[in-house]
Image (cartoon, rainbow, N blue to C red):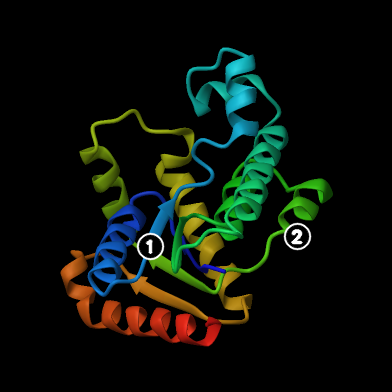
């Protein structure tokens, strides 16, 4: 069974950049790696969007109950996690997991019991990697993409999510790696080496 490494952090924290770096680095050491963003194109959320002719997630939030949208994301995440159990890949890097799903839901409402029950079906990843960044820096990175900002990417919403992540991690038991990503990834090279070493140790334990 693959080692599952999940990444969390607000938009603009550098999840895609760090996932690509770690994937490339592990593959150079002959470790097979796949990277996924399970909450980006899952069938439940996609079906809701296509069935209502919504062109974007912002359209969904304007036309549907926000708890329903969050439940589709949770279902997509559970379905994805079940689908990768038989992958013949050493390491799977996941762009977002239950912590992200729950944090985003709490932006809009108090998650209902059903939502919590769905997320409760998820197995914990072998390791969580959390990326923390100042909101102003995250906003600059988001702006540099030249894309329309989503409803989650306002300054207030990013601040809410950042604080929610911090409080959740304070209560979280188990292994997780914390990176401050205000600066370029090169400033975290030493800690990235430690992370790779930790991943290899988990691989040896799982053999």
Residue at (57% x, 69% y) in the render: 1
**Placement of 179 over or under 147, stated as above or below:** below
Q: Secondary structure at mark 1?
A: strand
Residue 131 shows up from this direction: yes
Q: Which residue is mark 1?
A: 33
Of 4 and 45, which appears nearest the observer? 4
Give the residue at the far top of this rendering.
Answer: 53
Q: Foreground mark, 2 or 1?
A: 1
Q: Which residue is mark 2?
A: 120
Image location (x, y in percent) of residue 195: 35, 79
Image location (x, y in percent) of residue 80: 60, 48
**Placement of 74 over or under 52, stated as above or below:** below
Alpha-carbon span between mark 2 and mark 1? 26 Å
Residue at (25% x, 38% y) in the render: 143
Image location (x, y in percent) of residue 158: 44, 49
- Quarter where residue 123 is shown: bottom right
């Amino acid at each position: 069974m693959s080692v599952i490494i999940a990444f969390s952090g607000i938009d603009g924290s550098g999840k895609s950049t760090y996932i690509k770096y770690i994937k490339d680095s592990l593959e150079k050491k002959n470790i097979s790696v796949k990277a996924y963003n399970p909450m980006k194109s899952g069938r439940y959320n996609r079906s809701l969007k296509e069935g209502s002719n919504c062109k974007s997630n912002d359209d969904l939030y304007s036309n549907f109950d926000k708890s329903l949208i969050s439940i589709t994301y949770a279902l997509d995440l559970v379905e994805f996690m079940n689908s990768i159990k038989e992958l013949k890949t050493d390491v799977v890097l996941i762009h977002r997991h239950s912590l992200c799903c729950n944090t985003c839901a709490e932006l809009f409402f108090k998650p209902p019991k059903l939502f919590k029950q769905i997320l409760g079906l998820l197995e914990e990843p072998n390791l969580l990697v959390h990326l923390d960044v100042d909101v102003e820096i995250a906003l600059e990175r988001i702006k540099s993409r030249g894309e329309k900002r989503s409803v989650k990417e306002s300054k207030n919403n990013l601040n809410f999510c950042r604080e929610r992540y911090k409080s959740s991690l304070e209560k979280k038991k188990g292994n997780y790696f914390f990176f401050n990503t205000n600066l370029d990834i090169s400033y975290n090279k030493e800690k990235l080496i430690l992370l790779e070493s930790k991943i290899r140790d988990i691989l040896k334990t799982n053999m």
